Image: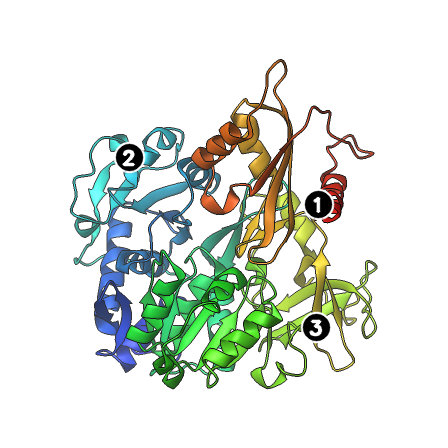
């Protein structure tokens, strides 16, 4: 391993920490810890195995696993090989997984023998998939044999292999995020994007080699994967947790002496209702919120349980990894603020004509800087909608600078602190997830039980938004709500299953464009239930 002064590429985060802190713990999973020198060796072996398997520069490696050592090794090892890793949320069902595999032409999939059978039928439609790697000793069994099923340990290569040589502007990851219409979009992130995010977040959180961070969010989320990048930049330890219940998080905080926790409001709401061992306050340095506004009552309860821990309230876009944070010393003064731009980023509030808004004037949040992603994978139309040249730049500059236009409405006060107002699109924000209403509707139509369907979110004290379905029966038939709900549970991950189904005779209302009017239905539903309460 060649000595380096600073890390520039994603995998160099681990390489540099392995040089500086070879014997320090890097990852803990299920009671076992992997040191930095061991993690780097495993990454090198995985990278060599990927090249030996024939993957070319920039080709995609899908990772469909829970949080475990191999998940991290595969992601950072793919980066070291010059490939692009695609972390897939482990709670997604086979149709959603297969869509992602097809959409970004995954060549090699890393999964487990337990997960493989459920994917069997769907993998037949993944024409680019050539190899499936399973991470445990169990026999893979039938399914996807035509894709060259191989054990993870057998893929690892210790012989000399010439790796592809990436540079910092090359793609390194594709994170899939739902849009307001249609299927999820693959946000393409470069080495530069992820490195800038790691260094920026670690700087304001004050991460150091003595930290232990608890990874509770999926690694397919930008904020979830950020736990790895910020920790590895600092030489810190990450504890991987696949929790079933909120009390599992509390137990891990105490048992592993966690110093940093990042989570989403629905989880914090549940955690705030539990008793915390007093010992946690002795070592938890901070807790950070992302994925929506944390209720003030929840924030107050958390601060009472760990008064020594600093609260960081954050806002982020997958398209720009991280965007803003509120310094802990400002929380008492403005607990409803999302703060200011993180280091090495600028956040603008713009009118529709591209000019800057005045203080307290609502406008669109626009993110510029090193964290702006490379666009959406193979989707020029949606990329052009969200990634646009900055207007009103200084004269003399010829090349355009692209920024992320978030679609979120915010305002900035006279001191520059930002406040979230609302979303311009119809995205449903539930349990920390961004959910496309169209994707839910497509699943409903696939049941052949419905005639028309509309999905939307309504305010919920715990979830942020609860998913509501308004639907009509298929022509000539009746529709039972419990039957449709059972069909949803078969086809959708838990966070996308509707909390309420409203069956109507139809037809559903249309807007002037002839489309089903989700907005009118949601307003009507909310008003009707307010009157009934």
Q: Nearer the viewer, mark 3 or mark 1?
A: 1
Judge the density around disc 3: few (<14), some (14-19), many (≥20) Cα neighbours within 10 Å: many
Residues at marks 1 and 2, CA–CA distance in whole angstroms: 43 Å
Answer whether labels 2 and 3 touch (C-beta < 8 Å).
Answer: no
Query: Do callouts 1 and 2 mark residues in contact (Cβ within 8 Å)?
Result: no
Distance, label 3 to label 1, CA atoms, is 32 Å
On screen, residue 441 above or below 478: below
Residue at screen point 46% across, 34% down: 491
Give percent across and percent down for residue 232: 36, 73
The answer to whether one can see residue 1 in this image is: no
Q: Is residue 395 above or below residue 503?
A: below
Q: Nearer the viewer, residue 456 or 173?
A: 456
| Residue at horizontal 41 percent and vertical 72 percent from the top | 275
Mark 3 or mark 2, which is nearer the start of the sequence?
Answer: 2
Give the residue pinned by disc 2: 117
Any mark on residue 529, and which? 1
Left or right placement of residue 378 versus residue 336 in this view: left
Q: CA distance from mark 2 to mark 3?
A: 47 Å
Q: Quadrant of the N terminus?
A: bottom left
Asked if disc 3 and disc 1 are in contact, CB closer than 8 Å, the reply is: no
Residue 267 in the image, given as x and y percentages of width and height: 48, 62
Give how far across and how far down residue 196 sits, in percent: 51, 71
202 vs 414, nearest the viewer: 414
Q: Which residue is mark 3?
A: 418
Q: Secondary structure at mark 2?
A: helix
Image side of residue 45 versus residue 519, left or right: left
Q: How is the image coloured?
A: rainbow
**Helix, strand or loop at disc 3?**
strand
Indicate which disc, 1 or 2, sits on the residue closer to the N terminus.
2
């Amino acid at each position: 391993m060649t000595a380096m002064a600073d890390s520039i590429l994603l995998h160099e985060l681990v390489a540099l920490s392995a040089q500086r802190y070879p014997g320090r713990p890097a990852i803990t999973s299920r009671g076992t810890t992997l040191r930095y020198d061991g993690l780097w060796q495993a990454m090198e072996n995985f990278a060599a195995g990927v090249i030996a398997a024939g993957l070319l520069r920039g080709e995609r490696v899908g990772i469909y696993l829970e949080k475990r050592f191999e998940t991290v090794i595969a992601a950072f090892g793919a980066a070291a090989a010059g490939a692009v890793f695609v972390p897939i949320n482990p709670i997604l069902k086979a149709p959603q997984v297969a869509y992602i595999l097809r959409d970004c032409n995954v060549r090699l999939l890393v999964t487990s023998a337990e997960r493989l059978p459920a994917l069997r039928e769907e993998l037949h439609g993944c024409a680019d998939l050539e190899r499936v790697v399973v991470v445990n000793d169990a026999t893979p069994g039938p399914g996807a044999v035509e894709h060259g099923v191989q054990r993870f340990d057998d893929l690892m290569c210790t012989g000399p292999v010439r790796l592809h040589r990436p540079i910092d502007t090359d793609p390194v990851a594709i994170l899939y995020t739902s849009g307001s219409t249609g299927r999820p979009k693959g946000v393409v992130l470069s080495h530069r994007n992820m490195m800038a995010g790691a260094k920026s977040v670690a700087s304001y959180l004050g991460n150091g080699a003595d930290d232990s961070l608890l990874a509770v969010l999926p690694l397919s989320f930008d904020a979830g994967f950020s736990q790895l990048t910020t920790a590895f930049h600092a030489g810190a330890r990450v504890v991987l947790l696949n929790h079933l219940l909120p009390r599992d998080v509390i137990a891990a905080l105490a048992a592993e002496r966690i110093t940093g926790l990042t989570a989403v409001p629905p989880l914090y709401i549940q955690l705030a209702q539990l008793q915390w061992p007093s010992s946690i306050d002795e070592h938890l340095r901070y807790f950070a919120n992302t994925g929506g506004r944390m209720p003030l009552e929840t924030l107050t309860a958390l601060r009472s349980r760990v008064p020594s821990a600093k609260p960081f309230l954050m806002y982020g876009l997958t398209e720009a990894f991280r965007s803003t944070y509120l310094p802990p010393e400002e929380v008492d003064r403005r607990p409803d603020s999302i703060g200011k731009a993180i280091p090495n980023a600028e956040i603008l509030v713009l009118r529709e004509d591209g000019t800057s808004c005045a203080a307290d004037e609502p406008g669109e949040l626009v993110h510029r800087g090193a964290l702006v992603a490379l666009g959406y994978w193979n989707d020029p139309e949606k990329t052009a909608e969200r990634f646009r040249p900055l207007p009103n730049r200084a004269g003399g500059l010829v090349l355009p600078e692209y920024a992320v236009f978030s679609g979120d409405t915010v305002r900035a006060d006279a001191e520059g602190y930002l406040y979230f107002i609302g979303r311009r699109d119809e995205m449903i924000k539930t349990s920390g997830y961004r959910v496309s209403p169209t994707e839910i509707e497509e699943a409903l139509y696939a049941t052949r039980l419905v005639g028309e369907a509309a999905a939307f979110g309504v305010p919920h004290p715990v979830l942020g938004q609860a998913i509501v379905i308004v639907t009509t029966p298929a022509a000539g038939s009746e529709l039972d709500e419990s039957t449709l709900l059972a069909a949803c549970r078969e086809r959708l991950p838990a966070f996308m299953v509707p909390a309420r189904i409203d069956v109507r005779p139809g037809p559903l209302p249309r807007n002037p464009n002839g489309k089903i009017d989700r907005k009118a239905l949601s307003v009507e539903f909310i008003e009707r239930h307010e009157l009934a309460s």
